[in-house]
Amino acid sequence: MMRVVRGFYAVAHSVKLCRPDVICAYPITPQSEIVENIAQMYANGELGNCEYITAESEFGAASILVGASATGARTYTATCSQGLILMSEVLWCAAGMRLPIVLTIANRSLSAPLSIWNDHQDSMAMRDAGIIQMYVENNQEVHDMMPQAFKIAENHKVMLPMMVCMDGYKLTHAYEPVDLLSQEMVDEFLPPYDPPVKMTTKEPYTFGSYATPASYMEFRAAVYRAMDRSRKVIEDVYKEWAEVSGRDWGGHIVAENCEDADVCVMAMGSLVGLAREVTKEMRDEGKKVGFIKIRTFRPFPAKEIAKAVDNAEKVIVFERSLSMGSDAPVTLDVKSAIHKKAIDVYSPVVGLGGRDVPHKLVKSVVEEVMENRVEPGTYFRGLKDCEEVIV
Amino acid sequence: MEKLRITLGAVSRPLESLKVKTGDWGAEYPVVIEENCKACGDCVVYCPDLCIELVETGEVDEKGRKKKVAKVNYDYCKGCGTCSVVCRHEAIKMEIKELYKG
């Protein structure tokens, strides 16, 4: 059923259809209305036997979900920015405990200075935790991703938390036409959670118990391998979704016009739509530009990217976050993926803290690379001329 | 174009935030119905942005006390509507800004 809804509702409606058992969240801009919508559904009795628990903080919310997930419940939360960072201690535990908690991240910048606006710094800070990360480009995709996220995370070969990342404001607050899923379809696609191990009051267990140097390393290697195994599981779920829904969002990446491209442009999240449009326009002007949408960020699709850019001379990675003291996060992975190839990597950092990324800016970034007017490396675009002073 | 000056550590001096007029954020704004207002101060306490104060009307009541009434600072009121919800005397109603009508 096609309806014009906001990003919040697209997420909430989809989560409802996944029949979660426990939802626990703490409100934070720009995530709040996702959980407000879910809370309203709960109050209206639309969530069946689901428990909706309000927590005193994100730390509490994540902790409650760890407990709930350990009892075999299908668990969900949404957060962003400082809230995600406050959850981080618990989420690293959740990954190590192999609990398939699903999260929606309404991507927002990190303090300081305080900003409530969009970039990817928050989820990037969770990069190494053992949480699967994928980024969506619009509200239909986030709507479609929620059932897939549960199916991926709960797969016994995986058993890891999963974050579905959507750009705060740019998507969460945006009204878009969304083909809303039906309960029948989601039920058919997503079986109930079948926990490999669960604790009850009669059968108590310790999750994430103490590991001395005699075994800690093996546990961590197991998480690493599970993340690696998830590559195939994710691909299979993406494919299955395309079949049952008729909407094919692609695999870990979506490469367009890259076969003969001199320059391949990469982007994640809501910037994808614009970057794709710009590169298509440049194609029409006869310029050999390709475009790659990165969907899965963890596990990183290194092989797929290396293959897609095989014939390119240059790669442009639009970055929406930083790693202070090194290249930006996506660039690090892209460089690692293509380290055997003689390809120059350009990393324009754009749109931090909600700074607008207009069409003109994206096009000028691609043009200056094509015309050799900029050196490879990390640089800012859309940055004002500024000086740092003491107050 | 003039250079943007940013301070080391995003440090700012006291009252710097007054420059950010948050009054244009909301779609609605509170209107005080003065004849209903008993100056109980509930709205003053509950306003999350310290945007309401009780001010003297210039009149005195039958006991000779100076009359007061709630007054909203529209420069900073974000239109959250908390005051209109907590008011026990139906003295604050929310109205939609002209910009958002129709």
Image (tube, grey):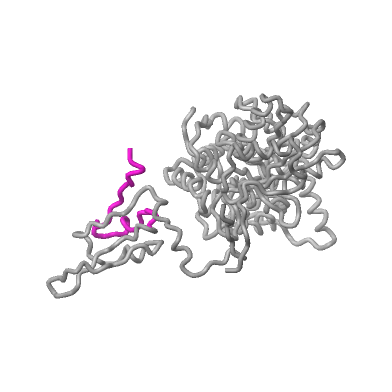
Farthest residue in the bottom direction? B64
Point out the stretch of residues depicted in magenta: B77-102
Residue A262 in sight from this viewpoint: yes
Image quarter of the C terminus of chain B: top left
Q: As displayed, is residue A66 above or below residue A281? A: below
> Residue A228 colored magenta?
no
Left or right of A344, for residue A47? left
Please state the total of marks drawn on the protein image.
0
Asked which quadrant contains residue A368, the reply is top right
Q: Position of residue A143 (x, y in %)?
A: 56, 36
User: Which quadrant holds residue B70?
Assistant: bottom left
Residue at 51 percent across and 69 percent down: it is: B13
A359 up-or-down from B28: above or below: above
Q: Is residue B72 above or below residue A235?
A: below
Residue at the right extreme, as displayed: A340
Q: In terms of image quadrants, where is residue A297?
A: top right
Q: Which residue is nearer to you in this view: A21 or A13?
A: A13
The residue lying furthest to the left in this view is B62
Q: Is residue B86 magenta?
A: yes
Decide which of A314, A124 is in the foreground and name it: A314
Residue B11 % position (x, y):
57, 66
> On the picture, is A162 further left or further right than B70?
right
Q: Position of residue A360 (x, y in %)?
A: 60, 37
Whole-percent x and y of residue A108? 58, 50
